[in-house]
Structure formats: C-alpha cells, structure tokens
Image (tube, rainbow, N blue to C red):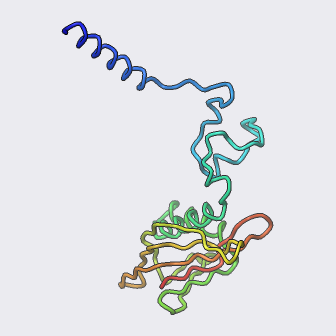
Amino acid sequence: MIRMTLLAMLILVSAAARAEEPKAATPDAPAAKMVEATPAAAAPTEAAGTDAKAPAAVAKGAEGRPYVDTAITFLKALIHSARSGEEGELAWAAARANAADAVTLKVGGKDLALDLAGKKSDAQLVRFHKLSTLREGAAVKGVTLENLELRVGAEAHTGKATVRMDEKDGKWVVTALEVE
C-alpha cells in the first residue's frame, strides 16, 4: 500500500514538473513567430527578416477582423488622450491614425466636438466593453459596444455605443462615435 502511494506521488510530481517546463518551438512554428496577436506583431518587418505570412500563433479574430483592431485602438487612444505629456501626445496620434479626417461624436442625441487634429474633445472616454461587429447585410459598418462610459464636463454618461467605420484603401477608419 505504501509503495503504491509513493509511486502515485512520484508520478504526480514528475507530471507537474513537466507541465512547468517551457515548451521548445517546433520546426513549423519557430520561437520568433510565437508572438502575441496584435496588429504590430502580425505585420511583417523587413529589418527582422520575417516572411510575409502571418504567425502561426495569431488568433483567428486578429486575422479576419481588422476593423475590430482599429476600433479598439481608436477607443483606447481616446481613453489615454487625457494624459499629459508624451503619453497624451501618443494617444492623440494613435486616434488620428485610426480615424477619418472628420469624426462625429453624438452623446444622447447631442453633437459634441471631437477635434483630433486640434487635440480637443468635449467628452472624455472612460471605459468600454463587450464589442460586437455591426453589419448591414453582409457589409461591415463598424462595431457596437454593450457599454461605454464617458464624461461630458462633470457629468458621467453610460450607454450602448456604435463606432461607425469605413474601409479606405484597404484600411479601416473610424468615422463616427454615437452613444445612446
């Protein structure tokens, strides 16, 4: 009985030790290609000498839904645009890079100012979650958000939101943000 208990403990310990060991890259998926699924990571770089194929570890959503990446990048940039210094400047630049020349902002039926070039907004985005694709027929028109929280002056406003988007020259850009 004691032998069997010791044998079972030995098997469990060795299995746990093997589970903690880092796995080596396989020949089909070298370690250099095992990167996080982000647009920057998925883009090929000539300096690094990577090929034009997408990495094997890239999630399905990152490959087939670039409009989602654009919307998330734009929204995160708006959240961080209130920061001071270089972080705020980088956030405004990221928002401009993922938006059309003119982006409309509607909150509760009111038009608010959103000037990406002038780095000014009447509303400050606080948080968002539960993103879904917005389609009209088979055509993608943007994304919807189950909940978006923002501040307009001193007032907090929370509601469902729609991020309208267009595809221009193979790149998705945000054209409007509407919050109920």
Indicate the position of residue 23 as horizontal and vertical percent values: 52, 25
Q: Give the vertical position of 120 relative to 33 (above or below).
A: below
Q: Residue furthest top?
A: 3
- Residue 54 occupies quadrant: top right
Residue 146 position in % (x across, y down): 46, 73
Is 107 left or right of 154, judged from the image as shown? right
Q: Is residue 154 above or below residue 129?
A: below
Residue 68 placed where, x, y %? Answer: 61, 63
Residue 15 drawn at (x, y percent): 38, 20
Instruction: Identify the residue at image location x=31%, y=13%.
Output: 10
Give the residue furthest to the right: 169
Residue at 56%, 24% in the rendered image:
24
Q: Residue at x 45, y 67 (%)?
A: 129
In the image: residue 40, left or right of residue 125: right
Residue closest to the far bottom = 110
Residue drawn at 61 percent across, 73 percent down: 134
Q: Nearer the viewer, residue 23 or 4?
A: 4
| In the rendered image, the vertical position of residue 8 relative to residue 141, given as above or below | above
Q: Quadrant of the N terminus?
A: top left
Name the residue furthest front: 1
Horizontal arrangement in the rendering, residue 91 relative to residue 141 (left or right)? left
- Numbered disc total: 0
Q: Quadrant of residue 127?
A: bottom left
